[in-house]
């Protein structure tokens, strides 16, 4: 995550999409505000005083970053809503005054958004520094102290890992029986599938995530990535077996390379590859502060749903998942198939 949030809309939004970090920030930053309709809000004048900038500076940022600020909770109230607001607060706090037909309000989220944008304010700089610390603390706390296996907190991880293991066995059996090459082939073709799916081999992937030599890379991969790897392994195993049946001989490495290249280029595979790359690149940068340089063009803002998925109440450590009756029922159904 960029230390200078003023330069990165993606990093700003990753923080603002993390409701657990926002809740902790609201508790610890103690910025003040007004409770309106069960939400903490701020008038433009309050925000200007809080961030120690002029009203014209606030207006300039509202113009230059209107869409972003509105998306994160800035709005203009009028009519019935304004009348209700005036009934609970002295609107002379706002520069618009009591007779204004409308009033601009910032949510707490929008105030943080503005603080991440302002380059003219020392107070905003201090808030940015504090929010970065809060985000790191919240992610570590809710992920059980470290993010190495944060992927396993997703309820889809175990079923995906179980299925991928079975497809992996079929693929390695096909390599054994259908490819004319020594035992080195298992590592080589694992890497070639990784390269096709996420543009890195196992050694490169481990280095980026800071994994130990003994760590299994797949234990750290997201469910969508495992499913895409499994689709390659399953399809290639069938193609290799069919080739041997039809030709009465084993494939050469060059022939298997051609099959892998064709699988990667297959338009049916394209949406799955793009999805796996986007999720790996975006989540690892957000949750693990790990940049996959080969996938940098795929990095996007992590959606709010992903924070629920990996940090929320339904996320669980692997040990908890393995003792969960619902998870065990899923495994039984998969085994019965």
Image (spheres, grey):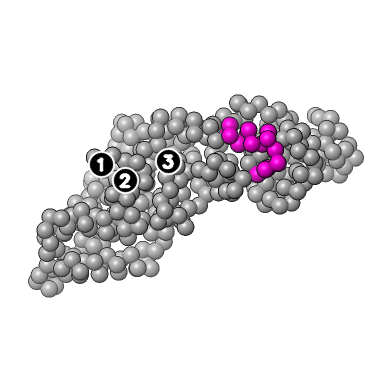
Identified at 48% across, 53% down, the residue is 299
> Does the rendering let one see residue 119?
yes
Q: For residue 288, which numbered disc appears in the image?
A: 3
In-image side of 172 versus 162 (left or right)? left
Local packing at callout 2 (Cα closer than 10 Å; few below 14, some 14-19, many 20+) is some
- C-alpha span from label 1 to label 2: 8 Å
Task: State how many labels appear.
Answer: 3
Please report contact status of discs 1 and 2: CB closer than 8 Å, yes or no. Answer: yes
Sequence-wise, the earlier of marks 3 and 2 is: 2
Which residue is labeled 1 in the image? 213
- In x, y percent, where is residue 110? 67, 41
Is residue 78 visible to the viewer in this orientation of the structure? no
- Quarter of the image holding residue 124? top right
| Viewer-side label of 1, 3 | 1
Q: Which residues are drawn in magenta?
A: 117-131
Q: Sequence-wise, which precedes: disc 1 or disc 2?
A: 2
Q: Does the magenta portion include 118?
A: yes
Q: Secondary structure at mark 1?
A: loop
Disc 3 secondary structure class: loop
Q: Residues within 10 Å of mark 3 (few under 14, many from 20)?
A: many
- Please state the horizontal and vertical placement of residue 45, each as a whole percent of the image: 79, 36
| Residue visible at 17% across and 57% down in the picture | 185
Q: Which residue is mark 2?
A: 206
Q: Nearer the viewer, residue 229 or 335?
A: 229
Q: Say if the magenta span includes residue 264.
A: no
């Amino acid at each position: 995550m960029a230390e200078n949030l003023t330069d990165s809309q993606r990093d700003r939004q990753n923080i603002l999409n993390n409701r657990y970090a926002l809740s902790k920030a609201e508790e610890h930053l103690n910025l003040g505000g007004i409770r309106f309709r069960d939400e903490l809000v701020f008038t433009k004048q309050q925000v200007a005083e809080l961030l120690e900038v002029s009203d014209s500076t606030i207006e300039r940022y509202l113009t230059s970053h209107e869409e972003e600020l509105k998306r994160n909770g800035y709005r203009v109230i009028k009519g019935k809503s304004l009348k209700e607001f005036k009934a609970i607060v002295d609107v002379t706090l706002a520069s618009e005054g009591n007779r204004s037909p409308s009033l601009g309000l910032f949510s707490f989220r929008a105030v943080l958004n503005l603080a991440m944008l302002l380059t003219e304010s020392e107070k905003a700089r201090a808030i940015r520094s504090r929010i970065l610390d809060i985000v790191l603390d919240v992610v570590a706390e809710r992920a059980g102290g470290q993010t190495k296996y944060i992927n396993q907190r997703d309820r889809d991880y175990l079923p995906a890992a179980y299925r991928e293991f079975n497809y992996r066995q079929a693929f390695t059996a096909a390599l054994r029986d259908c490819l004319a090459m020594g035992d080195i082939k298992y590592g080589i073709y694992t890497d070639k599938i990784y390269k096709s799916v996420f543009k890195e081999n196992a050694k490169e992937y481990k280095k980026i995530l800071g994994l130990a030599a003994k760590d299994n890379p797949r234990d750290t991969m997201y469910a969508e990535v495992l499913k895409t790897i499994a689709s390659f392994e399953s399809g290639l195993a069938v193609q290799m077996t069919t080739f041997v049946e039809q030709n009465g001989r084993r494939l050469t490495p060059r022939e298997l390379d051609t099959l892998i290249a064709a699988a990667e280029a297959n338009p049916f595979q394209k949406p799955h590859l793009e999805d796996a790359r986007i999720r790996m690149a975006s989540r690892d940068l957000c949750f693990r502060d790990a940049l996959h340089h080969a996938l940098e063009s795929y990095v996007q803002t992590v959606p709010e749903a992903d924070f629920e998925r990996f940090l929320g109440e339904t996320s669980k450590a692997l040990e908890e998942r393995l003792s969960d009756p619902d998870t065990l029922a899923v495994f039984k159904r998969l085994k019965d198939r």
